[in-house]
Amino acid sequence: MTSPVEGGAVPAPPVPRTRKSVTGTRKVVAAAFLLPALVLLGALVVYPIGFSVYRSFFDKAGTGFAGFGNYVELFTDDTILTAVKNNAIWVVVAPTVATALGLIFAVLTERVSWGTAFKLVVFMPMAISMLAAGIIFRLVYEQDPARGVANAVVVGVHDTFSDAAGYPRAHPLPVHPLEAGEDGAFVSKEPARTGTRALLPLVGVAPAKMPSDARPAAEAAPEAGRVTGTAWLDFTPGGGGKPNVIDPRELGLKGLKVEAVKDGKVVAATTARADGTFSLPAAADGALLRLPGANFEEPYNGVTWLGPSLITPAIIGSYLWMWAGFAMVLIAAGLASVPRELMEAARVDGATEWQVFRRITVPLLAPVLAVVTVTLMINVLKIFDLVMIITPDSSEAAANVLALQLYRSSFGTDADLGVGSAIAVLMLLLVLPVMLFNIRRMRKETGR
């Protein structure tokens, strides 16, 4: 449509259009849909952060301005400093080890036919809550080997390579022919003679604690040129026995070590049989018989996993049990996109499997490894559940972390919301650099 004007026709002005966004949606409509999310974001994220920062500058009651006093306490209070140190250990160790385990599992399971089943088993702990995992590992780390799986394994391995003490708390009575010696040993009052039978009775062992294959004690037969004898539990169940006499229902002390000592030197040694009998060579003639203190030591009871020195590594172990599967699945997904022709070309050129892994697989997986490591770092900075559940009262101070200290400072018996808010702000400041690094990395990946 044109309008006549002097000198010719000019085009009509364009019809104005309503401006739309890149996706074709009107900005007003987009804002209307985003408004509820923005309100929730402000109410659940922005406001709590702002209020925590504000509250961290006030005292315990919230009425007096404390300035930076609460922040000074964070770096002067021994309990909070322990929490900061433990968080640093968590951030360095847990993500690194979990990522390394995930990488190893992902690479190795590619080469086995049952790799999918293995991945399923390793990933399965992710379906368990932190609370349930904490309860499981509280039982795993029990000190009693009969209940704690970890100590059952440790004790089993230890006893395989080292003789276990057989009879803790066993001892002779005053009427017995034995007396106390050095280092918890017991020594015969009279020297032994060849051709005679030595008696080494003890008490103090509950019948239920006797070896299952112990047999009724027997009198040792005399042997020419040898010292023989019997070591037995001089106790008759139900009573009626006589001291220094082998009664029919009394058991031999199987495995009891017997040494012959002359002038302070061991000249012969042996071990009692299932019926308690033993035999020593002629060198034992005239020697005192000694039962070494090793016979009566408490049996090895495993490692104190939940003690102050090992509590943090023990809890990190339970965390790795849960999150190594997460790392493995993400790394395996990244590994599936690695060009196989590069690996095959390297093998054709003579590269070993270790060289292929170190120079090709790991560099190509670097972005995925960064994602997994950063995600786990953010996760461990907030670790709370496992530490709360697994740690016994005796190790609370040694296992403390920032999230747990935040809970105790804010809601404990002597709550100080000023200090609690300062811990919350500190945790936010610790997480921010990791988040910014992750955002920058994601933008670089998007821009490629």
Image (spheres, grey):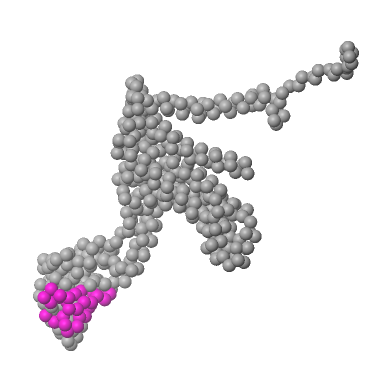
The residue located at (69%, 30%) in the rendering is 22
The answer to whether residue 377 shows anywhere in this view is yes
Q: Is residue 231 left or right of residue 424?
A: left
Residue 267 part of the magenta-drawn span? yes
Which region is colored magenta?
Answer: 258-286
Q: Position of residue 266 (x, y in %)?
A: 17, 76
Q: Is residue 162 above or below residue 23?
A: below
The residue located at (63%, 56%) in the rendering is 339
Q: Is residue 381 left or right of residue 231?
A: right
Q: Position of residue 187 (x, y in %)?
A: 14, 71
Q: Is residue 412 above or below residue 207?
A: above
Q: Position of residue 95 (x, y in %)?
A: 46, 48
Residue 93 part of the magenta-drawn span? no
Q: Is residue 63 above or below residue 95?
A: above
Quadrant of the image for the C terminus?
top right
The answer to whether residue 124 shows anywhere in this view is no
Q: Is residue 262 above or below residue 337?
A: below
Q: 340 and 166: which one is in front? A: 340
Residue positioned most to the front: 7
